Image (cartoon, rainbow, N blue to C red):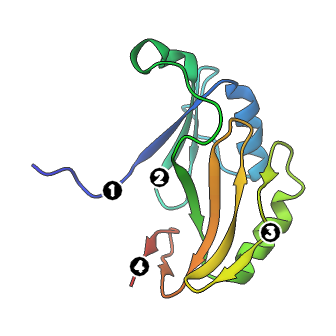
Amino acid sequence: MQLPARIGLITLACRDVERMTALFRDLGWPETPESDEHHRTFQCTNGVAIALYAASNYDAQFGPVATGFRGVCLSVNLASFQECVAVYQTLKAIKGVELLEEPTEAFWGGGFSWRDPEGNIWDVAWANGTTIDDRGGLTFP
């Protein structure tokens, strides 16, 4: 069997799970009933879930979580550049969000990047020709 081309859960290894939990709650993302004080989970509208788990649980197997850029960007794709600008305005008021740039249009579409309290980089983007389905799934042309 081949590995299916889908992502169901993304776990963020956190130095401070409660600080990240507060951020996701401030973003308005729905927390699942399965969350507990050790492992928080948030359900995204497109079926993917985001989990927050203490980084110390991974130290023995993978080593300590590095600070700074980890070579991965998490992306939230939107249906228009105007939606990117509106989300940027909302994120300005949320504690723990470090806006890295203002929304910029580009040949491919446009958007901006921000950093969460754990140092994870997030992109908010719109890409020309893509569609967003009813559940928030992204499809490229």
Which circle's residue, 1 or 3, is located before the other in the chain?
1
Question: What percent of the width, then of the height, locates residue 29?
Answer: 67, 51
Element assignment for label 1: loop
User: Marks 2 and 3, how far apart in space?
Assistant: 27 Å
Determine which residue is flagged by label 3. Answer: 102
Element carrying mark 3: loop
User: Mark 4 or mark 1, which is nearer to you?
Assistant: 4
Q: Amino acid at mark 2?
A: Val
Amino acid on which disc 4 is placed = Phe
Write the residue at 77% across / 37% down. 22
**Marks 1 and 3, how far apart at CA:** 31 Å
What is the distance, in whole Å, between disc 3 and disc 4 at their CAs?
24 Å
- Residue at x-position 51% and y-position 48%: 72
- The answer for how far apart the CA atoms under marks 4 and 1 are is 15 Å
> Residue visible at 53% across and 86% down?
128
At label 1, the amino acid type is: Arg
Please rate how many residues cluster around mark 4, counting C-alpha atoms within 10 Å: few if below 14, some from 14 to 19, many from 20: few
Q: In terms of depth relative to the viewer, which is nearer, 33 or 2?
A: 2
Front in this rendered view, residue 120 or 22: 120
Q: Nearer the viewer, mark 4 or mark 2?
A: 4
Q: Pick the residue in front: 26 or 14.
A: 14
Give the mark nearer the N terminus: 4 vs 1. Answer: 1
**Mark closest to the chain's N terminus, 2 or 3:** 2
- Whole-percent x, y for residue 1 in the image: 9, 49
Q: Position of residue 81 (x, y in %)?
A: 69, 81
Q: Earlier in the sequence, mark 1 or mark 2?
A: 1
Question: Mark 2 = which residue?
Answer: 48
Which disc number belongs to residue 86? none
Q: Amino acid at mark 3?
A: Glu
**Classed neighbour count for the residue bearing mark 1: other residues with Cα under 10 Å, few (<14), some (14–19), many (≥20):** few
Disc 1 target residue: 6
- Cβ–Cβ under 8 Å for marks 1 and 3: no
